Image (cartoon, coloured by chain):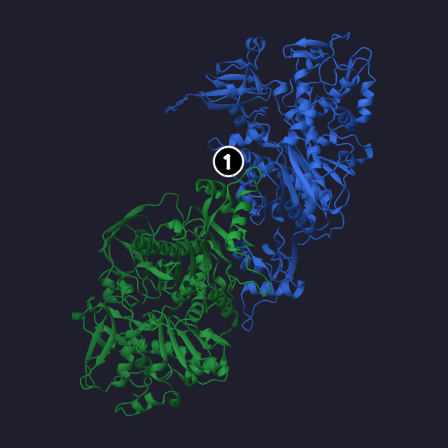
Chain colours: A green, B blue
Amino acid sequence: MAKTVEKKKYKVHFNPDNVEIVVDQGEDLLQAAIAAGVRIYASCGGAGTCGTCKVQVEKGDVETTRTDKITGEEFSKGIRQACQSRVLSDLSIYVPVESRLEKAVLAREQKRVSEVLATGWRFVPPLSKYFVELPPPTLDDNSSDLSRLLRGLKQRYHLSNLSIDFQVMKKLARTLRDGDWKATVTTLVTAVKPRAGDRRRPRVINIEVGDTRDKHYSLAFDIGTTTVCGQLLDLNRGRVVAESMAYNGQIRYGQDVITRIAYCQKTGGLKKLQQAVVATINDIIGELQDQSKIETEHISHIMAAGNTTMTQILLGLNPQYLRLTPYTPVANFFPPVPANSLGIQVSDHAHLFSFPAVASYVGGDIVSGIVGSGVHQRKALTFFMDVGTNGEIVVGNSDWMVTASCSAGPAFEGGGVKHGIIAAEGAIEDVKINPATFEPKIGTIGNARPKGICGSGLINTVAEMLETGVIGQNGKFNQDLSTRRVREGADGYEYVLARAAETQTGSDIVITEVDIDNLMRAKAAMYAGCQTLSKSVGIECCNFDQVIIAGAFGSHIDIKRAITIGLLPELPEERFIFIGNGSLLGARLTSFSTDLLDDARRVAQMMTNFELSENVDFMNNYVAALFLPHTNTEEFPTVSKKLAGRSNNNPKERTKI
Amino acid sequence: MAKTVEKKKYKVHFNPDNVEIVVDQGEDLLQAAIAAGVRIYASCGGAGTCGTCKVQVEKGDVETTRTDKITGEEFSKGIRQACQSRVLSDLSIYVPVESRLEKAVLAREQKRVSEVLATGWRFVPPLSKYFVELPPPTLDDNSSDLSRLLRGLKQRYHLSNLSIDFQVMKKLARTLRDGDWKATVTTLVTAVKPRAGDRRRPRVINIEVGDTRDKHYSLAFDIGTTTVCGQLLDLNRGRVVAESMAYNGQIRYGQDVITRIAYCQKTGGLKKLQQAVVATINDIIGELQDQSKIETEHISHIMAAGNTTMTQILLGLNPQYLRLTPYTPVANFFPPVPANSLGIQVSDHAHLFSFPAVASYVGGDIVSGIVGSGVHQRKALTFFMDVGTNGEIVVGNSDWMVTASCSAGPAFEGGGVKHGIIAAEGAIEDVKINPATFEPKIGTIGNARPKGICGSGLINTVAEMLETGVIGQNGKFNQDLSTRRVREGADGYEYVLARAAETQTGSDIVITEVDIDNLMRAKAAMYAGCQTLSKSVGIECCNFDQVIIAGAFGSHIDIKRAITIGLLPELPEERFIFIGNGSLLGARLTSFSTDLLDDARRVAQMMTNFELSENVDFMNNYVAALFLPHTNTEEFPTVSKKLAGRSNNNPKERTKI
């Protein structure tokens, strides 16, 4: 739309939030919603391709570009894609439940999480506080305030080789005198351990009046693509004082990292995304402070772990080359930056340290998880996986590690699935199908009326459909069953999980062959990645001593079900360990131990990254894994045997999907 | 004056500059002049005590606080102290010649300067440029941009252990690709040499597209209380490309450091002074760039030397404790700071490094002078002096150094002297008195009509008056001479150097007994300081192998005359060496040699500072030196003998002064 000198302004009213905003004529409804603070789910970031941002125009005119995401019936009801609709008059807009981004799920209890921790580390946080009482200057000893301070630190604590932040120098004279020559300094050891022979050079980052050693806190953050989790840590006692999480504010601009990187290429896009995640971080810090009543001035550091895209965006480093072949990050190691220079609302002296990354799609969150769970400390042959849009996997032990990212697609997060939603209240997460009647019994998050299906629900449903013969090992529906649950819909055959009358959306919730296909691609990518990495180092999947599953999503996976569909290798259940948010775990532990922080750098350097996207072996493994659980029955002997015993195995191939 | 909601505004017109400014009612004329950019000399910083800021009210009304600096005759002519006069109406103001701050003198050729330089240093500037051609990333080698760069630097230049400024990381991806993987990085070695065994950790401070090695420049600055001098240096060729100087803009707020420190205690005072000197620095940089046509982006560093007060104010470190006993600076060593964070108009990547200081009144300028002249490299027993308001002195050699500051008072800079002015055009700098008629023959700077007398002129005049018997060794006038040049004036006896008809000011220019007394105090402080330091290490002044005289003022001293009045020790003339601006010399040489930069730190640490202000020995020496040349004739045998041969020695003491 060409710029005009004076654009007309219109009021847009959003229901059920009951908020109103004035926008220029021609503004799209997604941007209007973002500006109004209305949380709309737009997984493709406004490209018009995902159809998740549907809204209903109750009153007024929009100009819309119709795509195949809107059915004729929807169109006639005034349903439009927000990102494809431009304001032409005052409007009243209704945001239906399935398009809303809800918060409840974040509080969902994580079951079955048993943390395996890094062990043997000393409790020596990289941040320290030292109290000194200095002799006041006299004519016989009128050395500079700084010399006096350094002398005091050397005498009492044998500290030397310190460097002084200029900010500290600025308030040094005042602080020493206000405290009658009693003061507390905060030091930060350079996150990067110098080489053998070099000594560390701790930085003095703060000085406070009097003895403040008992107020000594920092923050640990996992900056996830979907959620951001923060903990407020007591650095004297080595414990978590408060914890909170929130959706990453960037979610409004796109669900996955690729969409966000694309958004960064728009004018001002990087800045918007950077500000969005900073706003989320600030919200969490506010919440942590509300919980703990700890003041900003006593929080001296932020340890942040995130994937490479999240890290680069947070630091304002343009991520564009992460998604262009050959996929290069700006850096693997990031210097600490003053947190408030990024817009984070902490004191001047607090720095943010970003975990080192391995590659464009194996980021600091994975390094953090590895270090936090102590994989690098043990001889046990480990398969570590963090399942999500990009399933990152690591194979190795204390001596070596190989890693890769598998582009699993968004199915695990409910994306690309007809009624897929993120794991919010009302998401179907468990399904039992009666093998005689093929009637389902569904369980939802929060026991609410269903409104969609989340990733773990999808795995469970597909496993259940497979075991009950509703689908075959090729993922196609068995059309010979005597049930009306299986029917032909707009996208081909589908299974009705919940009927319109039972749902929040007022429509049937179904699972389609396209959905199953997407899940199969996702699980095939993960499994093929695991096989490719393992073979590259001469190992079979059955040799793993332990499988560590990280990630909030991961901890909701039912192991048996995941093995059934071929997502996880067929191993005894006791070898699987869930660590929940491994990224946050590592960020916390490295906040407590400089040893572990050194390990993080070493781990990031020792990991060998495999690019799977153009790897022939991976492609072969991937194609072989596009079956339930796998075309090679030797990979899943028990499951294959069980499935072979079913009556109605493997429906005929159909051409129409 | 109480604040009112709506203050009346008035126009103030300044002549002869012909500029006008609108100010609030009640604003003082000195502030109005500063705001209008009219350069008025106000040596006391607006306290009303110096009387140097006299202006003439041509039209309009001011409210003035009259002090004894304004005679009845002046008052009736409309002459007022600008700092004591508040605007009550539209005004026309004339700024007379003696109140103006002029620039011509800065270009004055410095004679007799023979630099003794530090020797034996390697040409290895702390700033380096390295050009790399990197292999573009491929899928087989898609390490991060930073890793690629570091690998390139290591392979080609064997550089390792580098740290990367975050600013560089921000533009890394763009720069490497824009230059088709050819780029030039700029590194800065930490100004502070690590301890033995530790390796240096150079910082990468900039990266540029392509090969820019031939454009490699930095700045050296001497930040003096009165003048600021800058040089633009070519770091490839080790030479000065351009040079410029200007009065320190702070001079409007007071002539000496004590007045400026006091001004810093006013609300916003520190900031004003900081901005004033930064404006001066920016003017000089602009001038250097005009001369050299070198672009801002190719200037990568500033090496600045100044006294402790100037350094602290430039860095925004409150100097208040410098003037309060026991005189403590904030620090002796200052970290490099991004120059544009101080307001200096250079690129983001350029840092300003401040020379380390010894004590509150022995600053980085002295350390710079010592290092620049190589005192620390030689066994020769050296007396180093920098004469000014605070004469700083150093005694020592390569093994040890003692130092002190002598509060000489402003007489050497023309302050506290009835017709004293700074060394500007029209300043009387040389005087010959006919021993028969006692008529003077004067020489002025720029051969202009006289308008006052500068510091070196004062030394020469007093020495000439002493040798011709116009004054006695006690500094009092001989009233028995048959000349009308010696007469009784408002401040006691005086000698008329120039009659009203010959001068620019339209008044007689005289030298009074009070003026002579001030000069005697100043030279006594310097000489007593030298004696006290020397005795503390068991040395006599006559043992010095060399006397190095630094400072712009110093290089205009006539050695014989200075010995005659007892300012310099009586030594053979060939032992005296003038180095001109030692501070700038050191700043330049350390910009060329990291070795010398390391030396600077070592020198600052090895110097032992003596506080003379409450030292009994110093007080005794001082009182003994309040005579021309000295009460102890053995200190000045030749001069004493010559004076003893005069006819009319030592006029009787008089009580009336």
Specify the amino acid type for callout 1: Lys
Residue B590 vertical position relative to residue B536 in the rendered view, above or below: below
| Res. B216 in view | no
Residue at position x 49%, y 16% in the image: B65
Out of B350 and A438, give the one closest to the viewer.
B350
Residue B284 vertical position relative to residue A27 in the rendered view, above or below: above
| Quadrant of the snapshot with the C terminus of chain A | bottom left
Out of A125 and B87, give the one closest to the viewer.
A125
Is label 1 in a helix, a strand or a loop?
Answer: helix
How many marks the image carries: the answer is: 1
Q: x and y percent of residue A90 in the render? A: 26, 49
Q: Toward which corner of the image does residue B636 lie, by quadrant?
A: top right
| Res. B152 in view | yes
Residue at position x 72%, y 31% in the image: B554
Q: x and y percent of residue B393 in the render? A: 68, 36
Q: x and y percent of residue B337 in the render? A: 56, 47
Out of A484 and A335, give the one closest to the viewer.
A335
Q: Toward which corner of the image does residue A646 lie, by quadrant?
A: bottom left
Out of A550 and A448, give the one closest to the viewer.
A550
For mark 1, does the 10 Å Cα neighbourhood hold few (<14), some (14 to 19), or many (20 or more) residues? Answer: some
- According to the picture, the residue beneath numbered tag 1 turns out to be B271
